[in-house]
Amino acid sequence: MGYVDKNLVPGEEIVYRAHLHLIIFLSPALLSLLGGGLVALGLVYDLIPIWVLGGLVLLYGLGLALVRHVRYVTSEFVVTNKRVLVKIGLFQRHTLELLLSRLETIGVEQGLLSRMLNLGTIVVTGTGGTREPFADISNPLEFRRQVQSAASDWLPSPTNPTGR
């Protein structure tokens, strides 16, 4: 049971759960492949400095992969019927719990490659100007749509004059 599941209030239900995009593992994978290639090259041609350099690059790539894995499994991005909840980190935890009624804007920042890979940065702005960006989110447009849909349930309308 994660942070979000433990901190739901009575009557609160999860509407949508987002995750980090797997692209965060690309640079560790490339570094590990490069390091492994250098180790193999050093062993084949008996070049100790290349072998040592390759080993260091390989270890760095594997260490970075471990750090990214911890980041991946400890990050939670959730929309409920009452709040937006975000938790990132294990040892140094960063949390955001914003009531939908206090949400001013939710933006998505994406470049061309990010749009093609369906990832981006979600920027949550609360009343009072609090601006919180969260990078490398998978399917950020769907996250924004779910937040907007949940927030619209809180707004007064002709059929629901008081909102929730």
Image (cartoon, rainbow, N blue to C red):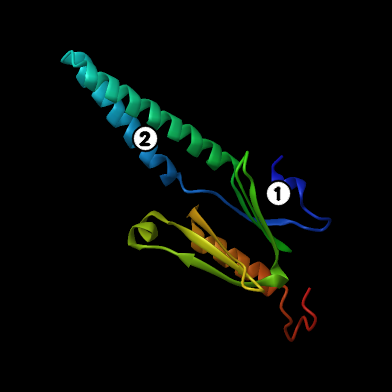
Residue, far bottom: 158
Give the quarter of the figure containing the N terminus. Answer: top right
Which residue has dot 2 on it? 29
Is residue 81 visible in this depiction of the protein?
no
Q: Identify the image quadrant of residue 50.
A: top left
User: Please, what secondary structure does the residue beneath circle 1 have?
Assistant: helix
Relative depth, front residue between 8 and 133 = 133
Is residue 22 visible from the viewing direction of this image?
A: yes
Where does the image place residue 101, in percent across and percent down from the top left? 72, 72
Label 1 Cα neighbours within 10 Å, binned few <14 / some 14-19 / many ≥20: some
Q: Is residue 107 left or right of residue 94?
A: left
Which residue is disc 1 drawn over? 4
Which residue lies at the image location 54% right of the left edge and 49% below the top edge? 19
Give the answer, above or below, for where 113 lies relative to 35: below
* Amino acid identity at mark 1: Val
Of all residues, the one furthest to the left in this rendering is 45
Q: Residue at point 33% right, 34% down?
A: 31
Residue 103, how many percent across, how many down?
A: 66, 71
Q: Nearer the viewer, residue 5 or 89?
A: 89
Amino acid at dot 2 = Ala
Do residues under tags 1 and 2 come within 8 Å of each other at their CB atoms? no
